[in-house]
């Protein structure tokens, strides 16, 4: 239809993807329809339209710029294993479910219209709504003119029936069949032969991948049912793909790999859990009296080994290390900690690699670096989990400061000996006492809440340009200083502008 350029918006300094289409024939009308369709969508898996303009000869559409590569390029490079293919298609189905809810049928779902953003995790954008059919106006397609790439068109479309959401579901099924099998189910001859093959239906995926679980084969087959009425909706397909256990072995013995795999992804999968487990277990063993001399190094080594090989086991092991040292202080404290640790293990079971980010709190508190928490916890998945890590890190830092008999974070007051719970045998009494002590220090509670909110909102400023980053950092500084007017200003300023620098230097990922 036209050309796409990487451009810069001179008003705000943001990079954009600028599509330029000549206003001749159907191309110009389709471009304007594409902009109208895309601008109606508000979903993280649909590429955002920023603006539309036209002159006498061209139509211009400015999209958000998302660095990455298409699914087609990742497939050709052998970078999609089974688990990645299922996740990509689940995200595509979620985008389509949103579009279908707006009365929009994409009509051209294929690997080259699926963008895999440069990110540690799979992050999909569905592109090119240029052939989209919206419910509120007639199609531009002439009778007999079937739009889209033939190899991904549903059989009912070849029979002249109108495009429906079920046709998009068929296309997702073809994409998933191709990604899992390593070859296309229909393509292999000329246009006539391909059309006839589509009419006969896709061959069973088990003929190519008999090793796949039955529920995977059933999900793919369900999307490729000849009757559009019997296919699942896009939302149902997304739910089915989400419920499939992820397998790491790829087709034809390919080594597992995630799309856009970078050093950041490797660091998060291996280095991060190993480092957190080693530092946390070793530091706890060395700081809280209980373990014999030499044990901290051994425990750190065990934590590092588990973190690099089995993150969930590393999380469980590291959370178990403080139990006996806390029992030296009070049996009730140890039992209360055990209950909290089990709850934390359950909450972070699906994201065990970053489950120990809360350890940043007690490690950063002695050097007044707690305002850097929102930046430190960004390796956790999801805003709610990041906020929980930041909140818990501050509270853990306060408890550790009390046990070590050093000034409490932010307000600098001296804690009571043993936090007032030494010798207590009842966990309920310990919990009540700790709650009473915490209520007596509202500054700590206020700072924990501020940093939790900042951790949740930080991705909104990340990668959006220098001014949003700087404004966010300035707001963080101001918000952090509100509940703690007596806190040292210099550490807050340093932390805020280090956060701004990290936001400015980080490439946009739009996560």
Image: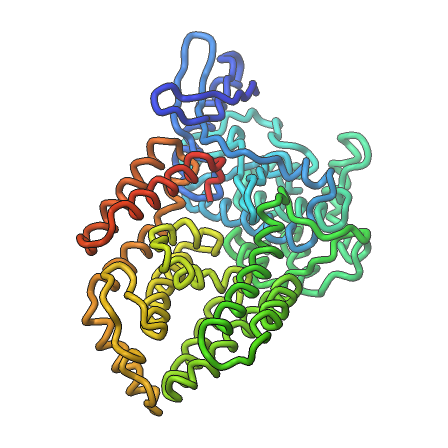
Closest to the observer: 174 or 192? 174
Q: Residue furthest bottom?
A: 425
Residue 207: name its quadrant: bottom right
* Residue 245 at x, y percent in the picture: 63, 64
Q: Nearer the viewer, residue 201 or 22?
A: 22
Display colour scheme: rainbow
The spot of residue 115 in percent (x, y) is: 57, 37
Q: In this rendering, is residue 72 above or below 298?
A: above
Q: Residue at x 60, y 71 (%)?
A: 313
Q: Position of residue 431 (x, y in %)?
A: 30, 81
On the rendered structure, is 470 left or right of 189?
left
- Quarter in which the N terminus is drawn: top right
Q: Position of residue 464 (x, y in %)?
A: 40, 34
Q: Looking at this view, name the residue that lies furthest to the top.
A: 56
Count how many numbered circles sit on residues in the image: 0
Q: Quadrant of residue 114?
A: top right
**Left or right of 97 on screen, residue 226:** right
278 or 316: nearer the eye? 278
Query: Horizontally, is 422 left or right of 155 in the view?
Result: left
Please report the residue visible at 61 percent of the width from the left and 45 percent of the height from the top.
263
Q: Identify the residue at image location x=45%, y=72%.
A: 287
């Amino acid at each position: 239809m036209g050309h796409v350029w990487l451009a810069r918006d001179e008003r705000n300094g943001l990079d954009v993807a600028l599509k330029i289409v000549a206003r001749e024939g159907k191309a110009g009308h389709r471009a304007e329809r594409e902009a109208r369709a895309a601008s109606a969508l508000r979903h993280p898996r649909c590429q955002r339209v920023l603006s539309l303009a036209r002159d006498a000869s061209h139509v211009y559409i400015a999209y958000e710029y998302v660095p990455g590569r298409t699914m087609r390029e990742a497939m050709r490079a052998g970078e999609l294993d089974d688990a990645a293919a299922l996740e990509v298609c689940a995200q595509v189905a979620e985008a389509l479910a949103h579009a279908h809810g707006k009365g929009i049928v994409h009509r051209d779902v294929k690997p080259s219209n699926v963008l895999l953003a440069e990110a540690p995790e799979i992050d999909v954008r569905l592109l090119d709504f240029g052939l989209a059919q919206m419910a509120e106006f007639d199609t531009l397609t002439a009778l007999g003119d079937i739009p889209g790439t033939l190899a991904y068109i549903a059989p009912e479309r070849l029979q002249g029936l109108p495009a429906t959401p079920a046709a998009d579901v068929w296309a997702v099924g073809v994409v998933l069949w191709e990604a899992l099998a390593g070859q296309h189910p229909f393509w292999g001859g000329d246009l006539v032969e391909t059309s006839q093959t589509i009419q006969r239906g896709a061959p069973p995926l088990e003929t190519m991948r008999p090793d796949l679980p039955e529920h995977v084969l059933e999900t793919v087959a369900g999307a490729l049912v000849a009757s559009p009425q019997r296919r699942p909706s896009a939302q149902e397909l997304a739910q089915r793909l989400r419920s499939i256990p992820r397998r790491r072995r790829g087709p034809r013995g390919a080594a597992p790999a995630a799309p856009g795999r970078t050093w950041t992804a490797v660091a998060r999968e291996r280095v991060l859990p190993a480092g957190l487990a080693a530092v946390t277990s070793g530091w706890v063993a060395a700081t809280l009296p209980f373990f014999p001399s030499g044990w901290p190094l051994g425990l750190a080594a065990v934590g590092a080994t588990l973190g690099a090989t089995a993150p969930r086991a590393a999380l469980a092991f590291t959370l178990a290390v403080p139990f006996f040292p806390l029992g030296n202080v009070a049996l009730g404290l140890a039992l209360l900690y055990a209950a909290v640790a089990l709850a934390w293990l359950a909450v972070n079971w699906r994201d065990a690699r970053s489950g120990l980010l809360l350890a940043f709190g007690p490690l950063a508190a002695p050097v007044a670096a707690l305002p850097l928490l929102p930046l430190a916890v960004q390796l956790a998945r999801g805003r709610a989990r990041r906020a929980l890590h930041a909140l818990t890190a501050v509270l853990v830092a306060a408890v550790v400061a009390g046990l070590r008999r050093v000034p409490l974070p932010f307000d600098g007051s001296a804690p009571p000996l043993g936090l007032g719970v030494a010798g207590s045998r009842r966990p309920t009494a310990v919990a009540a006492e700790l709650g009473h002590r915490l209520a007596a220090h509202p500054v700590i509670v206020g700072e924990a809440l501020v940093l939790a909110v900042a951790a949740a909102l930080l991705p909104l400023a990340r990668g959006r340009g220098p001014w949003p980053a700087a404004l966010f950092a300035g707001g963080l500084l101001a918000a952090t200083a509100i509940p703690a007017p007596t806190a040292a200003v210099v550490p807050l300023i340093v932390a805020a502008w280090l956060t701004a620098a990290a936001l400015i230097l980080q490439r946009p990922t739009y996560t």
